Every structure is written in structure tokens, then in C-alpha cells.
Image (cartoon, helix red, strand yellow):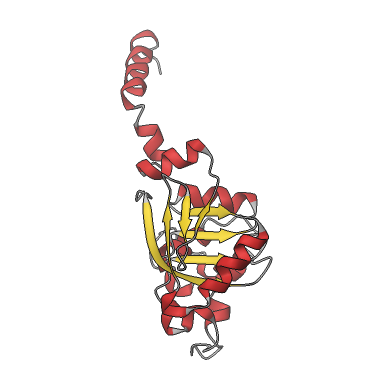
Amino acid sequence: MEKFTQFTGVAAPLPMINVNTDMIIPKQFLKTIRRSGLGKNLFDEMRYAVDGSEIADFVLNKAPYRKAGILIAGDNFGCGSSREHAPWAILDFGIRCVIAPSFADIFFNNCFKNGILPIKLEQDRVDALMAQAENGANATFTVELERQVITAPDGSEIPFDVDPFRKHCLLKGLDDIGLTMQKVEAIEDFEARQKSSQPWF
């Protein structure tokens, strides 16, 4: 998993509440078990018309936000089914941080496991950042995980909370497999002892 230490990018405003995982990545794209290639289908039914043409007024189809690295969204982001393809699609598009007043629990947890930093802020702070994100190419934000601070385009700094263990994992680039591999010597020692004491296994 790629480390998350400090990230600077254009923030796309998505002032919608209850954005569910089927909106993030529709069900027809869940056949793959690969984490790559889903970015082009992120918000597919909002980005594209039935004939495959782009819907011009959707935020990620507008020039400043085509390469957005941060998403600022409404309350209860990531609700619905627990599909891990949702954070896969967000990450593959290039978004490393999602800011919202609240998240669905499973989606929130899946973000950390895939190298995405989800940040919960009070509604008034999200509204203020959303307003600055409307500035298009000038809507460049910096997120510093070590300091737990968002620097907005106007220079203001907004602190945020993050669980210490999840912060450690993001800073070190540790997903569940990476955490397990940190214990590889202890695992090998256990396997050797078991093989010696219980050879029938």
C-alpha cells in the first residue's frame, strides 16, 4: 500500500448527501478482483450518458477537476453495500483524501485499508472548504497527516482527528497484509515449533 504522508491536489466539490457505493461504482463493474482500472468508472452513471458521452456539468468532467486528488462531499458518504470496489475506484481515479461530515462505517474502514485518508469535519468547516473548492484550478489543498492539518487555498489551516493506529498504518503504508508481514519472524518460529511438537499436522 502506498504511504500517505502529505498530499497536495485540487479538491473537487460534491455537495451531495448519502452518496452510496452503487453511485461510486455501479454494480456492473464489480466482476473484477483487480484494484486497478476502475477509476474510469468512478461515479459512472453521473459522469456518462447512456450513449457513453460525458455529462458536461458533472464535477469530475470539468477541466479543473479531471485530475482531482481530493474530494469534498456531503454527509453519510459511502453508505449502501460494503463493496471494497468503491475505495478501489476512488484511489484508481487518483483521489487520496475524502473530506465529509460523516461516512458509512464500512466504507470509512475500507478507505484506510486502501491508502485513502477519510477526514470527518464539522458541517460548517466542510461547507467552508466546499466553497473554496468551487474555485476550480485554484482549489489546491494540502493535507498533512503527521500534523493532522488541512491547508486550504486561502492559507487557513484546519485541524482534523484521526485514530493513532490508522494514522500509523497510513504513514508507514501498512495494509492488513503489511501488518501481518511485520510479524513474519514470530509466525515462522511458531510454525517451526508446531512442526516439531505436532509433526502429524
What x and y, as percent, mark residue 4?
38, 50
Horizontal side of residue 145 vs 50, given as left or right? left
The picture quadrant where one finds residue 93 is bottom left
Q: Outermost residue toward the top?
A: 197
Q: Is residue 92 visible?
A: yes
Give residue 17's quadrant in the image: bottom right
As displayed, is residue 193 above or below residue 96? above
Give the residue drawn at x 43%, y 59%: 96
User: Is 83 placed above or below 185 here?
Assistant: below
Q: Quadrant of the C terminus?
A: top left
Identify the residue at image location x=52%, y=79%. 59
Q: In the picture, residue 16 is in which quadrant?
A: bottom right
Residue found at the far front of this picture = 155
Residue 5 rendering spot, x and y as whole percentages: 37, 49
In the figure, 198 relative to 21: above or below? above
Q: Is residue 77 visible?
A: no
**Between 93 and 194, the one nearer to me in the picture:** 93
Residue 193 in picture, x, y percent from top left: 35, 12
